[in-house]
Amino acid sequence: MDSDNSLFPAGHMIFKRAKCLADLEVHAWNLDRIQLRRGAFISELDAFHTYNVQLGIVRHSIQIAVNGDVPSNAISFVVILNDASIVQHKHTMKKHHLAVLEHGAEIDAVFVEPVSFLSVAINRKLFREQYEGRFLEKYPIEKKFELRVCNAEILDAVKEKLMRILEAVQIKHTFLLLPENMIMLEKTIIDEMLNLVYTSAHEHSESKWIETAESLFKLIKLRYKQDINIESLCRELNISERNAYLTFHKHYAMTPKQYLLSVRLGKIKKILEYSDPKTTQIEHIALQHGFYHMSHFAKIYKSFFGELPSETLWRNKY
């Protein structure tokens, strides 16, 4: 491993408790200046470095504003451990959020209550070279700051695993001195961060996708009789089929196609239940609701309702 190009002093441990401004200015590698909002404070940092990763827990007391930057050769990930909130880049970051900063992004955070958060910084060059295909699929390279909404269960599992790693290294810090152990720790930490990125959504777009799912739901319900498909509805709403599938399934526990099918079959069943079997043509009703192959329609209908359309039509009529 090329230590000359490394981001951190390998094997370095930090256990610091700051009680004044001067202490806090040298508390962490990425802080340039600190402004105290009010009164005395306590700040603690427990962290360790490999060549390419810093993992740490930071605790701040009330009313502190932090200004600084993420170096251009680092990507930084932050998650909150307690029930507090951080105002970061005019966004309110809470317990279910993941903040991602890179490309020399400015740190501009205000802690309005005692806060504890987990911070991971990774050598950007290593991250990009070894994990580019997986990471860029979800995260555009031009972004400097991004706030993402995480799945609560996955976020809790990742936080617990990283905290266990930090605790284990603190107990036996000589573990860090072996290069093979550092490589193993780096891979584990990076994989956990990638897992969070993959299973999270852009905070600002979450409400947009909820609205999109609702719009698609209403369109299907309105036009179920028409010769429509999900692809054309997605084009109309200016979204991809993939996003429509993921968002719709998340909010309605079914895919858009499954919902369209269930609406059509439900309407047909209700018509058959109240129709005169002597004058009703099942084929005609099926065609009106978007089914053009009768054998296929009968098979799907039976899989839904446990009986053939003709059995529904004739049931309890005499």
Image: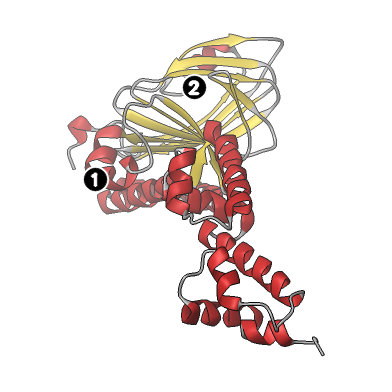
N-terminal label among 1 and 2: 2
State the residue at coordinates (42%, 45%). 240
Give residue 21's quadrant in the image.
Answer: top right
Number of residues whose C-alpha sits closer than 10 Å to that of mark 2, classed few (under 14), some (14–19) or many (20 or more): some
Q: Nearer the viewer, residue 207 or 142?
A: 207
How far apart in space, not on screen, are marks 1 and 2 (Cα)?
30 Å
Indicate the amino acid at tag 2: His
Name the amino acid type tagged 1. Gln
Q: Which marked residue is nearer to the observer: mark 1 or mark 2?
A: 1
**How far across and down, in percent of the image, does residue 7 sit?**
29, 31
Q: Is residue 24 left or right of residue 274?
A: left
Specify the quadrant that holds the N terminus.
top left
Whether residue 80 is visible, yes or no, is no
Q: Is residue 10 above or below residue 72?
A: below
| Quadrant location, the C terminus | bottom right
Query: Where's residue 123, x and y in %?
Result: 30, 34
Residue at screen point 63% across, 47% down: 218
Q: Which mark is residue 130?
A: 1
Residue position marked by numbered label 2 in the rendering: 27
Residue sitting at the far bottom: 318
146 and 63: which one is in front? 146
Q: Local crowd at mark 1 within 10 Å, few (<14), some, or many (≥20)? A: few
User: Does the residue at mark 1 contact the one at mark 2 (Cβ under 8 Å)?
Assistant: no
Classify residue 263 as left or right of residue 12.
right
Q: Secondary structure at mark 2?
A: loop
